[in-house]
Image (tube, coloured by chain):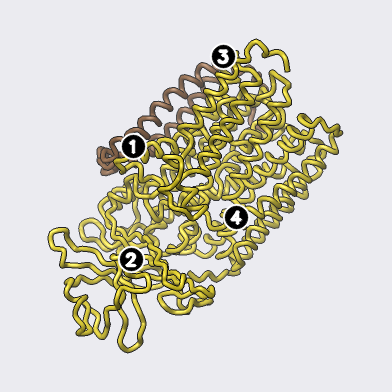
Amino acid sequence: MIYESSWQAILIFFAFVGFTLGLSFWMGGKAKSSEGYFAAHGQIPWFVNGIAFAGDYLSAASFLGICGMIAFYGYDGFLYSIGYLAGWIVALFVVAEPMKRLGKFTFADALDSQFNSRGIKLAAGISTLVVSVFYLIPQMVGAGALVTPLLGFDQWVGVVMVGTVVILIVVTAGMVSTTWVQFLKGGLLVVFSAILTWMILQRGFTVTKGGVDGHEFLTMSVQAEDLQNDDGTVGELSDVDVLLGNDGWEKSTRFVRLQNRNTKAITVWHVQNLTEKSPDELLLSESQTYTTMTDGKKLVNGQPKGTKKGEPELHPVGHIVELPDGKTETGPLSPIDFFRTLQQSKVVLWRNEKIVHEDNSFTIVYFPKITTGAEVLRPGEHPTFKGIRSEKLFDKVNFLSLMLALFCGTASLPHILIRYYTVKDASSARKSTIVGITSIGFFYVLTLYLGLGAMTSGALDVSDENMSAPLLAKGMNTWLFAAISAIAFTTVLGTVSGLILAAAGAVTHDLMSSVFQVKMNDGEKVRIAKMSSVVVGALAIALGILFQKMNPTFLVGWAFSVAASANLPSLVMILFWPRVTRQGIVAGIIVGMVSSMGWILLSGEAYSKVYGLDAASAIVPFSQPGIVTIPLGFLTLVVVSLMTSGRKKST
Amino acid sequence: MNSRNSRNGLILFAVYLLFYGGFVFINAFDPSSMERTPIAGLNLAVLYGFSLIIGAVVLSAVYGLLCGDASGSGSKDEEPKA
């Protein structure tokens, strides 16, 4: 699609960024000491900290990734919402209060509270850095994807902008400004998502033949023999020739290409059997193509891609073709009627297939798939969740493993854990977690409405599911689009700030001060932390550009697996098992971290999406490591602790 | 960790773990049951999914009430500052 930036979007965007930076500079004076820089002096009110939890946690993956996955595949994206929220139960009931009591600045403080061990600080510091960097990549990728349509810049410009603004926020006032940015962003995200949901319910559903640009997608039923004739007629079309399957098209049997005899324009049609009983009756559905030539030129539906509105571009998609009882529109719907009506409707979803041509240019064909509401609202349609409907045991284990990692990962994320040190006591830590769960839970309920609302909005970019939520808002109101886009951008700012602070804390407090025992006064600690923030921020920019084609939700799933495998065993065992030793903790962290990362790098998903190899040739039998590596982390910790229990006191 | 809070937390954690585990295992081993529409025309996937989210919010509120002022941090810490 062609995105034209609106002055409203630019105005609100720069107002948000300007306000955020102004806030940071204003608060800069409150973060002179290391306690102020890393933990905001423990003086953040619990309610503010609770909403800041939401601002910290509801990342680009939550907002853009989940809404996009629901918009394109239905219920499956909501499985992430459920898993992400369930993880907070572990955080509240198991981790929150002890974390506050045992620690000071970082997660390593809590682990090391009984031992004063450089080994624990080293292992926990490295684990914090690894998880933070894994989590930073999707945030930066999301930032780039967001800025492109909003301001019309290239993706790398968006990544550099986010990196620069975040470094300024973190360097000026550390945890104080980061907390208030997250508070504002968390609150605004929940409020504006609620407004958008209310507008979706007021709009209801309407039967259409295409998206918001007015293009009506044709479908026609034909006999198989019509495609063999050379009389120039196929279904409702006349003066067309059926093109031979060559130049890569012969590898796919689901498409037929028709060429107009007069204009020579080629259209691509998706072929399906109308019924299983009569294979000669076919349904042809108009598809869209996006071709990348060897010289980098792009073609849309066979014509050079346009640069401004009115020129060739992919048509927006996402529409309902059938409502219950033959209705053409529903009018406003209640929250329950929304699902009840969709359950009995038919929606057009879009899938794609890549055709590689002889000269190595390639075409992505986007084709419609009429889907019943019952299928949209059931799990197991997205490739990540195919295990639900698979007969293969390893596919099911992969699904169980992902849901386990989501459940265990939240309470192990370093940037979430450090937020327990910004309130003054254990009671405030508990209360802020309850506020966090309530606001995050409310938002996740809304994600299903937002995603399904986008699915039926006619405004989706068929080539970019991450833009579903902003485009849904754009279809409603330009100002709303501007606000949602700016909030989504601040969403990235808030999460990235927290991650960079967690990483800077690990470098300064855990590694330099505790492990390498570099003597620093308080001011020097803050200075080193700021320098670390700049380095981590620069690294995040580089990785964001390098991984710009990866799906944010997919990458976040990896971060959760590594965090849960490396950090959760030691965190839980130090609270509930008196025989734990420092050697056990170090071994548990290292084995959990290395095994989960190794598993990911040897998985089918990494083979196909990172290395471009055949997923079937991967070494490990399924992609999600949690179900193996989390228990392995626990087992290692227990065995090593038992083996070294006689040496517990000797550090 | 305050032993009463810890005990309450672990009991509520076990309750939620069973609830969450039930959802995950039904999805994995009996996915077609998620398509049933037992109440108000809503399928089990939507009903169970929303129940898990609302259940988490309710259990966290219950935990907060059970902890009350006896968290060991003193009542002076219980006043909201926002």
Q: Quadrant of the C terminus of chain A?
A: top right
Mark nearest the camera among 2 and 4 is 2
Q: On the same chain: label 2 and label 3?
A: no
Residue A422 versus residue A453 in the image, above or below: above
Question: Please, what secondary structure does the residue beneath circle 2 have?
Answer: helix
Residue A547 quadrant? bottom right
Residue corresponding to mark 3: B3
Q: Chain of mark 3?
A: B
Q: Position of residue A492 (x, y in %)?
A: 60, 51
Q: Position of residue A248 (x, y in %)?
A: 37, 70
Q: CA distance from mark 3 to mark 4?
A: 43 Å
Q: Chain of mark 2?
A: A
Extreme-top residue of the structure: A646
Looking at the image, tell me whether mark 2 or mark 4 is earlier in sequence order.
2
Please name the residue shown 56% across and 59% down the image.
A146
Kindly identify which numbered label has been placed on residue A251.
2
Kindly identify which numbered label has been placed on residue A393.
1
